[in-house]
Image (cartoon, rainbow, N blue to C red):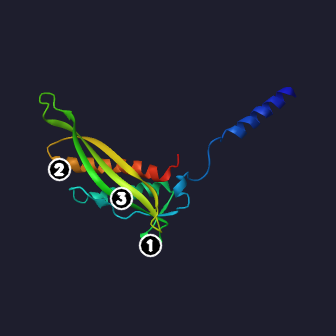
Amino acid sequence: MKQFALLLASLAFTLLTSCAGYQLGSDKPQKMAGVTKLAVPTFKNDTLEPRIEVLVTNALIKKLQMDGSYQIVPVNEADAVVVATITEIQRSQFRSARNNTLRTSELLMGLLVTYKVEDNAGTSLMAGQAQGYSNIVLDANQQLTERQALADAAEKLSINLSSALTDGW
């Protein structure tokens, strides 16, 4: 009888503490708790790289849709709007050739975005910066290589930005 009571007590303890710290649903930032519909218009591009704003905007929309915390809608139906500007594209040498340190063999590319989230009244709910970096080995077609690096950096930037918009911790 004593063994049965001990087994029952350990089973009850396991069942009561196995889900400690978990909750259903998303854990949005406190200021975004009332937002269910979010609009993400095309970002503004302050760089000289053409068409990069569409690439970054689409990457963020895909990440937000995968997360599921917000319903992505047009601006006129939204509770809040993400207003963002691509401010800088950074290019730097990540690795040089063995026999010539001036020749780049691997390139580090970064995207920097400033953003703010505004509600329907124009009040700023959140603001900040997000960045994404990618390193890529250069080959003969440098333009294509840079474009692929920018796409990868946009993907990483969208992970950081969607995390800032959806994670409240």
Assign a secondary structure to mark 3: strand
Going 44% across and 72% down the picture, which residue do you hit? 76
| Disc 1 to disc 3, C-alpha distance | 17 Å
Amino acid under disc 3: Ala
Q: Position of residue 70 (x, y in %)?
A: 50, 60
Q: Nearer the viewer, residue 121 or 48?
A: 121
Q: Secondary structure at mark 2?
A: helix
Relative to residue 164, is residue 6 depicted above or below?
above
Q: Earlier in the sequence, mark 1 or mark 2?
A: 1
The correct choice, above or below, for 161 with respect to 37 in the image is: above
Q: CA distance from mark 1 to mark 2?
A: 38 Å
| In the foreground, 140 or 94 | 94
Q: Are marks 1 and 3 in contact (CB under 8 Å)?
A: no
Disc nearest the viewer among 2 and 3: 3
Q: Residue at x 50, y 57 (%)?
A: 68
Q: Secondary structure at mark 1?
A: helix
Q: First in sequence, mark 1 or 3: give its number.
A: 1
Q: Amino acid at mark 1?
A: Asn
- Tag shown at residue 153: none
- Whole-percent x, y for residue 133 in the image: 31, 44
From mark 2 to mark 3, how far is it between C-alphas? 26 Å
The label number, if any, that marks residue 84 in the structure image: 3
Pointer 2: residues within 10 angstroms few (<14), some, or many (20+)? few
Q: Which residue is mark 2?
A: 143
- Residue 125 horizontal/vertical position (percent): 47, 58
